[in-house]
Every structure is written in structure tokens, then in C-alpha cells.
Amino acid sequence: MAIFAAMDAAELKQYFSSRELPTEIRIAPHMVVTNVPEFLRISFICVDMWEKDVEKCPSWVRLQLLKDAIEQ
């Protein structure tokens, strides 16, 4: 598993909104996001609802994977 730089949800939302995003992107060998805007919308809803440590939230991990894939 990748080690992610510390960003909070607001910073991550700003990161994604400040970039031109692809429609589809592979974020892991077994994961392809086919609708990035919808993926972001749903993922941030899940992160906002998560009541435990955000770093253990599956949606948070996938958002970080998306960020890493965009930067490559």
C-alpha cells in the first residue's frame, strides 16, 4: 500500500477541482474509475460520513490512489 502525504478532505477537494481530470483512469491494477466526477462526488460523501479515523476509510484510500494516478 502506498504511503500518502497528509491532506485533509478540503485540501483534497481543492486539489481535484484545480486540475483537468480524465474521464476514465486506472487507479490500481484491479481498479478502473470510469466516471471520475461521479467517483469524486460519491467518495467525498462517504468520507464526510465516516466517523472513524479517515485514513481507514476505503473511499479515502481510493481518493488517494486517484490522486497518485493523476500525478503519474
Image: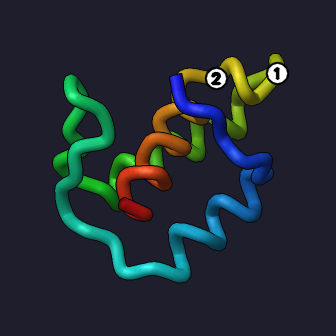
Residue at 69% over, 18% down: 56
The residue type indicated by label 1 comes to Asp
Q: Nearer the viewer, residue 48 or 31?
A: 31
Residue 22 in picture, x, y percent from top left: 24, 68
The residue type indicated by label 2 comes to Cys
Residue 26 in picture, x, y percent from top left: 22, 44
Helix, strand or loop at disc 1?
Answer: loop
Taking the image as shown, residue 68 lies to the left or right of residue 44, namely left
Against 8, residue 17 (above or below) is below
Q: Find disc 1 in the rendering and name its residue.
A: 53
Taking the image as shown, residue 56 lies to the left or right of residue 63, namely right
Residue count near mark 1 (Cα–Cα under 10 Å), binned few <14, some 14–19, many ≥20: few
Taking the image as shown, residue 17 lies to the left or right of residue 34, namely right
**Label placed on residue 57:** 2
Query: In which quadrant will I find the C terminus?
Result: bottom left
Mark pair 1, 2: CA separation: 7 Å
Q: Nearer the viewer, residue 22 or 2?
A: 2
**Quadrant housing residue 33:** top left
Q: Nearer the viewer, residue 5 or 20?
A: 5
Residue at 65% over, 72% down: 14
Helix, strand or loop at disc 2?
Answer: loop
Residue count near mark 2 (Cα–Cα under 10 Å), binned few <14, some 14–19, many ≥20: some
